[in-house]
Amino acid sequence: EVQLVESGGDVVQPGGSMRLSCAASGFTFRNYWMSWVRQAPGKGLEWVANIKEDGSEKYYDDSVQGRFTISRDNAKNSLFLQMNSLRHEDTAVYYCARDISWGQGTQVTVSS
Amino acid sequence: DIYMTQSPSTLSASVGDRVTIACRASRNITHWVAWYQQKPGKAPKALIYEASGLVSGVPSRFSGSGSGTEFTLTINNLQPDDFATYYCQEYSRNFGQGTRVEVK
């Protein structure tokens, strides 16, 4: 069974940084593209970034390009999202996803 | 980028109704569409994969169809548990804006 468990969400001030992690299990992690998706309060789902199986290709939504970095450690079955220069509008629940399988999410709040 | 346009944004229906939600892609994405159901405070739950595949454990009243740029989610015999928000997604990329199915 696919299991994805996000962690690292917290409250941070505007301009600050945060690193999210996702621990994967139940499948061969190194064989799959992985994604981050977010949902701001009262809003729809928004794709954030994804990364190829070996980490050689990465794609970002325009809203986070240049501020967020997606990465992975296939030896540790882990996915990461480094978020810098955070803004109020980055406040959201962040989900780790493999195709149609998702974690339960971690809350990121950007507030002064 | 490929954009996903979902309609309607809100749909009012009654228990027992047949409900149809449309999703249009800005370019041909063959069959690479998934559909999700989301209830308040919960993570999205996958219903349909690859446009028409029913996810294991999802009731058979849910079905998906379409290919290329036009896709549809249909719910037959709407049940009380089905009142929720539904999203389409191009696999691992952009989402539609969502359709809230509410009680008529």
Image (cartoon, coloured by chain):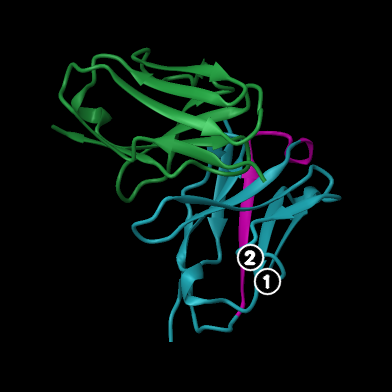
Chain colours: A cyan, B green
Q: Circle 1 — which element?
A: loop
How far is the residue under mark 2 from the one under mark 1?
Answer: 5 Å
Q: A53 left or right of B14?
A: right
The disc placed on residue A64 is 2
Q: Is residue B91 magenta?
A: no
Quadrant of the drawing holding the C terminus of chain A: bottom left
Q: B71 left or right of B100?
A: right
How far across and down, in percent of the image, does residue B69 sit? 58, 26
How far across and down, in percent of the image, does residue B62 sit? 38, 18
How far across and down, in percent of the image, does residue A19 sit? 63, 69
Above or below for A20 versus A30 = below
Q: Circle 2 — which element?
A: loop
Chain of the residue under the numbered disc 2 shown in the image: A
How far across and down, in percent of the image, does residue A20 sit? 60, 63
Near-viewer residue (B5 or A68)? B5
Chain of the residue under the numbered disc 1 shown in the image: A
Dot 1 amino acid type: Arg
Near-viewer residue (A25 or B19)? B19
Quadrant of the drawing holding the N terminus of chain A: top right
Q: Is residue A28 magenta?
A: yes
- Do the residues under discs 2 and 1 have CB atoms within 8 angstroms? yes
Q: Which residues are magenta?
A: A17-31
Identify the residue shown where x is 78% and y is 35%.
A31
Above or below for B68 versus A28 = above
Dot 2 amino acid type: Val
For this orientation, the residue located farthest to the bottom is A112
The disc placed on residue A67 is 1
- When asked about the image quadrant of residue A25, the answer is top right
Identify the residue shown where x is 42% and y is 28%.
B22
Identify the residue shown where x is 15% and y is 34%.
B103
